[in-house]
Amino acid sequence: MGRMLNALSKRALERGPARGAEPTGHFTVSTDLHGVVWMVLDRTDKRVNTIDRPVLEELATHIERFEREKPAAVVIRSGKSAGFAAGADINQFVGASAAEIKAALEQGHQVLDRLAALPCRTIAVIHGHCLGAGLELALACDRRIAVSDASLGFPEVMLGLHPGLGGTFRAPAVADPVEAMTMMLTGRSMPARRAKSIGLVDAVVEERHVAAAVEAAFYGDLRRKPQSLQGRAMGFKPARQFAARMMRKKTEEKASQANYPAPFKLIDLWEAHGGDPKAMQRAEIDSFAELIETDTSKNLVRVFFLREKMKSLKDGSSGVRHLHVVGAGAMGGEIAAWAAAQGFRVTLGDVKLAPIGAAIGKATKMLERALKDPLKVRDALDRLIPDPDGIGIAHADLVIEAAPEKLDLKHKIYAEIEPQLKEGALLATNTSALPLADLASGLKDPSRFVGLHFFNPVSRMQLVEIVGHDRISSETARRATAFAAEISRLPAPVASAPGFLVNRALTPYMAEALVLLDEGIPKERIDHRAEEFGMPMGPIELTDQVGLDIALDVATSLRERLGEDTLPAAPQWLTKMVEEKRLGRKTGRGLYDYDDDGKPKKLAPEALPDGSKDDPDMLDRLILPMLNAVVACIDEGVITDEEVADGAMIFGTGFAPFRGGPIHYARQRGIDAIITRMGELEAKHGPRFKPHSGWERLKG
């Protein structure tokens, strides 16, 4: 029954009288017998709608006509199946000066102000994604009708900005002001029904009821939700001052003002001008133009394009419909659940029943967090099939092995799997450490074998390293890359080499932190210094998160394979902790102790004892070996594209996004300066800081 209702809801988009009309540009415009104008935005030059100067200029010409002809009502909706609009076209910001952007914003505001001032009822019909400038266009209308699949948000903060086309004053005017501000401060999208509950939209309907909802809005039967007492209170400065203090405190817990000025700027604007829309409008334009010239915004815009570049590595379809995962441990279970969430049929096998049951239980919780829709969770779980007998192997288009990192065990698994694979099926490993050539050595057809290295947790870590080897076919590499993109992950092609890219770069960062800890520097100070730089988690806590046993194995293996001079030896006490099963977060005790919620028990940096040890070189000791390893990977051909290397480090390790990636950061800091600095650290602390010869070639 549920599937039948879902199918019914996915019928063609309601376009009113514009259904059969010819487009005159980006809009198709037609008027029905009652004088209601339908404007369908369907950009001819893009796969999704974006809002930029050509769209706004075309909208202005239509508004000018409406001002003369006075239609009964105007309906604006999208003709794209993906959604209403994906926001502003980021390309228009690149290379533009603050003055040019300010002038463009002022013109855009004039258009939306004229739309808001039309004497007739204006109605936005929203389906799919409605983000940024797309939501600001909808907010300039009198009423907003959301189709049940709609998702609304202001993602500008992810680009180091805040809304710039009226969102800062229109959203708090129609929705609960604190909720509207929270949307803008976090960049998180909101589903349609939640948006209705805060007043951002006026109705939520299925697609088949859109025409009736438009009629109700036209005749005045669709009333706005009255603003709450708290919402009305925010029109007065004392209430806003109190709320602003709370907002700053919450924002500071997530990001520092020095690194991410945009949310703090937005709070300041709202606190000062939230009761005066015109003043807020002027301040919004000025502030947006200032922010777009900051290094943070420029670097975050760069990160946006890095993401797009990695998505564009997809070339055609993977041909994968059915995935089989061998190994229902932490990684295998998450890979299987995530692929099921993305619409793939997945069978999950293991040598024992208990891990499969545990994986399904964990998958349910992960899917509830990620999908937030009981129907979608149910459908994903329907696609995730326990398969203790491995029946799915013979039917799968792709089999991913996610067994423990033991070469003999993996060879045994492949010997059982390979004869069962159907023609055209791919075999992949999720290994993070073993050489692909060694793994492929016993295969009859190594051309269809590939590494798909996911990161934990799969539901949050966007990167997948696509690991090649000397006998892989180009078609296998192409299909594996396409599969990663099809499950909404970002592919990074790498060669099989010790640690690939991410573990090769991350291990020196974690290993040096243990040396600093061994020197007597408090772990909280080490983590705080890295977090101040912009890392999402300090290296000590990260080591606990990875697991001390795994961190020790990886560091030992890399040191053996790359040479003793590349990494410091692990402190003896770390080996002892592993022997005692103090393995970090997963055992409740490691370098930190953990509470029942899995949070580390930390001293605040300011609470550290007076006179506790510090090292002025600490930050460079942590960060520069990481950069050195990335340069080595580029120079050695482990990864061939400098931009993809930056993207992989941002999306695979969380490397400070506002710095634009490790190589970009190095170029901004100055390659000569980094070579000199590493030479100083080498003289002081040993050969692990020797700058790689690739730095010199990077200058060319």
Image: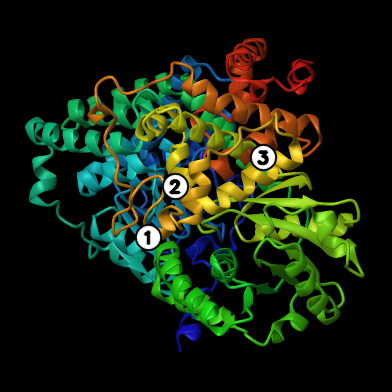
Question: Would residue 194 appear left or right of 552 to someone viewing this image?
Answer: left
Q: Nearer the viewer, residue 450 or 88?
A: 450
Q: How many marks?
A: 3
Name the residue at 44% across, 62% down. Answer: 370
* Observer able to see residue 93: no
Q: Mark 1 highlights which residue?
A: 191
Image coordinates of residue 649 in percent, x first then y, are 60, 38
Determine which of the numbered discs, if any, sits on residue 131 in the image: 2
Q: Mark 3 highlights which residue?
A: 504
Distance of label 3 from label 1 (alpha carbons): 39 Å
Helix, strand or loop at label 3? It is helix
Which badge, 3 or 1, is on the more N-terminal residue?
Answer: 1
In this view, the mark in front (3 or 2): 3
* Observer able to see residue 192: yes
Amino acid at the residue labelled 2: Leu
Which badge, 3 or 2, is on the more N-terminal residue?
Answer: 2
